[in-house]
Amino acid sequence: MPWFQIFQDGPEYEARKRRGKFTPPVVSLKQLRDAVPHHLFERSTTKSLAHMFRHFVIILWLLYWGWQGIAFAGRLIYLFQAGHNALSSHTLVNTAIGLTVHTLVLTPYYSWRVTHNTHHKSTNNIDRDETYVPQTRQDFKLPDDKVTVRMDYAHILEETPAYTLFKLFVRQFFGFQLYLLHNRKGNPRYPPGTSHYKPSSKLFRPKDRLSILFSNIILLTFLTLLIHFSYLHGWFFLWNHYFLPWLGSIVLFTYLQHSDPTIPYYRKDQWTFARGALATVDRPLFGWVGRFFLHNISSDHVAHHFFPTVPFYNLPEVTKAIKPVLGDYYNYDSTPALYALWRSFTQCTFVEPEGDILFFKNQYGEALVTPNFES
């Protein structure tokens, strides 16, 4: 790729932008399931463990912060897979792997599994989704769109590039931890004090509370071991080899899967499971590095949302099988990762408080795509 293309939109993104009008998809889940060969749904405990072992061996040798951060992010894919019982046909194996891997990246297994599964059941449903719920015009105290002019938007929303970079830095390195801690960027329907570490949180049902408490105990035990390790070998060593990669390991690719100016959000009767699954974007993040270390979760995320129990190593074949069925409704974007991150972060500013099909508007109140209500 020529160096200047790093700062250009991908052709797939440009095509969605040129279409301008969005017609909500009508897709049969049976069509998609029938298009996927049956063997791709089969889970192999041996194969999953072999991939995980390979990944842990790599982690032992990757000492450079950036590579280690990507490797840590790859380890997080096992969070997704274990939480969906996709690593093995044995629930106990999925739970054991999930608890182990979640704990190693300081993530509460049971509480995160609950909210992540809710996210899958209500993807891009603005009323019920759990993560990356967009802010509305009312949240910014913007005037009604019928009377607001470009200068009004600029006065309230426009930021200096330095401040935008600072916010992007906070989101990338601390966003996931802040979400777990106090529901930052989660659904605003939850009251203040909502936390993945609080068993009585409205995120969970009463029957989940013992499991949440168990996750917290496991995490506290691991943190105690880390503190003891830092006492033996020094805090600086632990910071270099564990905490720096841990801080930057997840937000970029999860944010880009669900935040894009050309992708819709839904309210009320316009949302269906299929439309929510199609409100995601497949991105070839970092080329072969992303495929190898992130285990296809970015390049085949649409397939993961339709069939979350499919093992990650079968996702490319599932994508290949469902693309002809989905046609233009399949969202793919080859825009380089860092440019796509800046684009989404600066253009996905808010949505309107009314309407059943919504697209992000930028800092000047402009949307790239509008719903085709005639359809």
Image: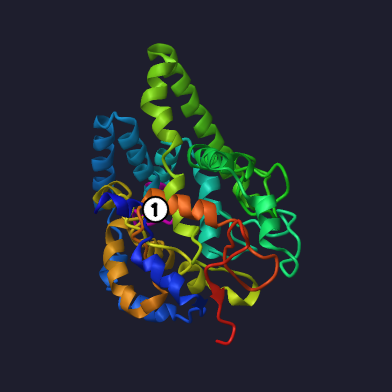
As rendered, which of 24 and 169 lies closer to the eye? 169
Badge 1 marks a residue whose secondary structure is: helix
Image point 44% across, 81% down: which residue? 28
Badge 1: residue crowd in 10 Å (few <14, some 14–19, many ≥20) = many
Locate residue 232, reporting x and y percent.
Answer: 40, 12
Amino acid at dot 1: Gln
Residue wearing tag 1: 81
* 374 is higher (above) or lower (below) than 176: below
Please state the horizontal and vertical placement of residue 132, each as a whole percent of the image. Answer: 56, 54
Residue 38 drawn at (x, y percent): 28, 72
The residue furthest front is 151
User: Does 89 appear in magenta?
Assistant: yes
Where is the N terminus found, in terms of image quarters?
bottom left
Q: Which residues are magenta?
A: 78-90
Q: Tell me how many marks there are.
A: 1
The answer to whether one can see residue 305 in this image is yes
Q: Residue at x 39, y 48 (%)?
A: 338
Q: Nearer the viewer, residue 101 or 190?
A: 190
Residue 361 screen position, x and y as percent: 59, 62
- The residue lying toward the viewer, choosing from 216 and 32, is 32
Quadrant in which residue 16 is drawn? bottom left
| Quadrant in the picture for the C terminus | bottom right
Indicate whether 285 appears above or below 373.
above
Residue appearing at x 24%, y 36% in the figure: 57
The answer to which of 26 and 84 lies nearer the viewer is 26
